[in-house]
Amino acid sequence: MPAAPGTIHGRYYDGKSACVREVFVVTTPGEVILRDLGDSSLVARWPIVELGILGDSEHEAVPLLVRGGDEARLAIEDAEQRRQLATAVPEIAAIGARKPEPAGRILQWGGALVAAIGLFWFGIQTGSDTLAPMVPYGLQARLGESVYRAIAGNRPQCDGQEGLAAINQFANRVAAEAGYDHPISVRVLKGGPVNAFTLPGGTMILYGDLIALTKDGDELGGVIAHEIGHAVLYHPIKGLARQYGTQQILKALTGGYSDIGTLGSGGALLAALRNGRDFEREADEEGVSLLEKLGLHADGMSRFFEELLKAEPKDAAKAAGIWSDHPPTAERVEATKRPATGAPDFTPAEWTAIKSMCR
Amino acid sequence: MQDPSGPAGPPSPPASRVEPTLIPQPTASAALAPSRPVYDGKLGELYAIYLRHLLLMLLTLGLSRFWGRTRIRRYLWNHFSILGDRFEYRGRGLELMIGFLIVVAILAVWAGVVWAIWHFGFRDRSAPGLDIIDVVFLSIGLIGVPLAFVGQYSGLRYKLSRTRWRGIRCAMDGSAWSYGALATGLTFANAMTARLLTPVVSVNLARPRIAHAHVGTQGFEFAGRAGDIYGRYVGYYFLNIGAWIVAVGIAVAAVTGSIARLGGAEFEEAFTHPGPKLFLTIAVAAFAAYLLFGVMILPLRCWWRAYLYRYLVSHTRAGTVLFATALTTRQMWGFLVLNYLIVMLTLGLGWPWVIHRTMRLIAGELWVYGEPDGAAIGQPPQRPPRFGEGLLDMFDVSSI
C-alpha cells in the first residue's frame, strides 16, 4: 500500500540501532501508526496518550515525536506536515508550532536588554546610595577588619595611647555630628605613604608619615574629617556595590568571553576611578561641613592640601587625569577653603601627644 | 579498499583548493560516496536566543548561564545534520549547574586543606607579605593548568553523552585524569623545548580525544603520527621566528620614532587627559599593529593550523566512514582572526555571528565519505556522566 499524496512522511529511528527508516504516518483516534514508506509494513504503533515531544520549535529545527519510555524517535522534516499531524492529533499540538519570527524577538529581547542595562546602571548608582546604610553593621565591620589585616600585615602601629585616644575621640565626635551611630576606630600605622583611608564598618587607617606632614592639629583634623565624610556617607560599601554591579553588567554582556572580559575589567576600573573622584569630592564637602557645624576650625583641610601640593608640585592626581582616583589637588584646595574661625580641632596637649605617638 | 595495517584517509574531496594531505584511494567505491554536513541555522534565530540569554544573565547575575548555554547548544546541534539526520542535544541546565557547584565544593575543600597546611605548618615561616589568600590562589593557579585539561576532556565527554544522532547516544571513554596528566606533561615539555614538540603535542592530544569518542557502539579511530607533519612544522617554526623579528623591529622603530617626534611630556599629557585625538591615534596605532601582525605573523600561523586540521581530520575514521577537509589558509584566517576581531570589535555582541560562521565553515568544509552500517551500531555501553563540565566552566573559556 503506497503512501497517498498529502500523507505525513518522517524518518524513524528505533532507538536500538542507527538504522533509519523512511515512514509515513497514519493517525487513528487512539494511535499514531508508522508504516514503512516502501512496503507499507507496520513499523510502530504509538498510543496517543503515550506520545511526547522532544524540544520546541524555537530551539529545534525539528522537534522529535517520541513514545514515553522509549528511545525510538520520529523526525518529520516538513513543517507543514508537522502542522498536519498536530491538527489531526491535538494532544501533540506543540509539534506543529510555527518557528517564531526572529525579528520580533530580537527587538523584544534586545529592547528588554537595553532597558535592563539602563535600569541596572541607574540602580547601581542610586540604589547603592540607599542600600549601603542598610548593610548590617556587623558584616561591614568584619569586612573592614579583614581588609585592615590584609593591609596592615605585620607592620608596626603607632601606640602612643594619649595621641591615639585624642584622634579616636575627635573622629567619633565628628561622626556623631553626622548622625553616624556606629563607633569609628582609627588605627595609625608607622611610616608611609602620606595617606589615610576608611574601610567598611568605620575602620580608619592613618599613616605616621601623614601625621608628620601636618603642621598643626587643624590640618590633621581636616584630614580626619574628610575620612569621616567617607564613613558617614558609606563610600566604602557603595564603592564595592558599584564595582560589583558594573562587573556584572560587563560579564553579562560579554558572555564571559575572556579578552572582552579583560576589556570589560578596564572599563570597570575606569568607572571605579570616576566613582572614587566623586567620592573624594563628597567627602571633602561633608568633612568641612561637619567641622563647621561643630564650631571647629574648618580651614585645616585646605591647608593640608596646600602642603601636599608643595610636597609634590606636579600634582600626581592632575597628571594622572582619568586614571586617578582623586580629583586634582589644586581643585580640592579651592573647594575646601574656609576662614580660620572657631575652636581648634585639638587642644595643644592633644596635639603634642599625637605628634609623639609614633616615636 | 582499506589498508589492513590501520585506518587510512579517504580520497580528496571534490574541488579541493589546497594541496591534498590525504592518502589517495585508488579504488574509491560507491560505498565511499562523499557528502557534506548541512547547517541550516539562521543568524537571526540564534541572535534571538542569545539576546534572551544575555538578559537573563543580567537579571540572575550570571546564574542562568547554564540554561542559556544549553538552549544555544540545542539550537546548534539540531540545525546540524550529517547524511540527512540531525543531531540532538539532550543536556540540561541543571546538570551543568550541579557540575559547577561540585567543582566549587572541591575547590573549597582544597582551599581548606591548603589553609590547614599553611596555618599549622608554615604560617610563622612564610615570606613577608604572603597571606593565606595568596597561598590559596597560588595553589589553585598551580592545579588550574592540569585541571583545565581534565576539564576539557570531561567537558567533551559530557557534551558527547548528551548528543544523539539517529537516536543513538554518543559517548566517550578513557580517563580524563590520564588525559590531564598527558596534556600537562606534553605542554610542559613543549614549553621547555621552545615549542619544538608542537607536532608531538598536537597529534598525541588529538588521539585520545578522537579515539575514545563513539557514536553508540561505533568508535572513532585516529591514525596520525607526529613524524608525518614535522617537516611542515619545522618550516613554519623558522619562518615564524623570522617574521617576529622583522615585525617587532618595525613596531619598535615606529613607537620610538613617534615618541621622539612628540616629546615625552606631550605624550604623557595626551595619555592622561585623553581627547578625540588620542582615541584616533590609538585606533590608527591598533590598526597599524594589527596590519603588521596580520601581514607578518598570522598568515603563517593560519597556514600551519589549516594544514594541521586537514591532517587530523583526514586521519580520522569511524568504521567505514572516512573524513576529509580542504580547509584553506584563508578560511583558517577567517576562523581564527576574523572571528576574534568580530567578537572584540562588537564587545562580545558578535559572538552568535562567530558561532554561526564557524558552523557554516564546518558544514562547508568537512567531507564525509561513505555511510555507517546503521544496523551494526547500537546504544553505547558506557554510562553517561550524571553532571556537566564543571571543571571546564571553572578553568577554561567554555564557549558553547
Image (spheres, coloured by chain):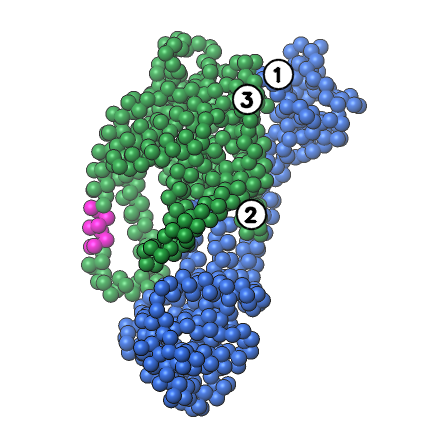
Chain colours: A blue, B green
Amino acid residing under circle 2: Leu
Amino acid residing under circle 3: Pro
The image shows residue B103, relative to residue A322, as above or below, that is above
**Location of residue A55 in the rendering, given as x and y in whole percent from the top left corner:** 63, 33
Q: Can residue A157 be seen? A: yes
User: Which callout, 3 or 2, points at the residue further toward the start of the chain?
Assistant: 2
For the residue labelled by badge 3, is the local secondary structure a helix, a strand or a loop?
loop
| Nearer to me, A193 or A274 | A193
Q: Nearer the viewer, mark 3 or mark 1?
A: 3
What range is drawn magenta here?
B249-257
Is the residue under label 1 in contact with that under label 3 (CB below 8 Å)? Answer: no
Q: Nearer the viewer, mark 2 or mark 1?
A: 2
Residue A280, located in which quarter of the rendered image? bottom left
| Cα separation between marks 2 and 1 | 42 Å
* Residue A21: mark: 1
Residue at (54, 31) in percent of width and height = B385
Asked if the stretch drawn in magenta spans residue B375, the answer is: no
| Quadrant of image for the N terminus of chain A | top right
Report whether mark 3 lies on the same chain as mark 2.
Answer: yes
**Location of residue B24 in the rendering, given as x and y in whole percent from the top left corner:** 35, 14
| Quadrant of image for the C terminus of chain A | bottom left
For the residue labelled by badge 2, is the local secondary structure a helix, a strand or a loop?
loop
Q: Can residue B72 be seen? A: no
Residue count near mark 2 (Cα–Cα under 10 Å), binned few <14, some 14–19, many ≥20: few
| Nearer to me, B208 or A267 | B208
In the rendered image, which residue does mark 3 sit on?
A: B380
| Cα separation between marks 3 and 1 | 21 Å
* Residue B63: mark: 2
Q: Main secondary structure of the magenta part?
A: helix
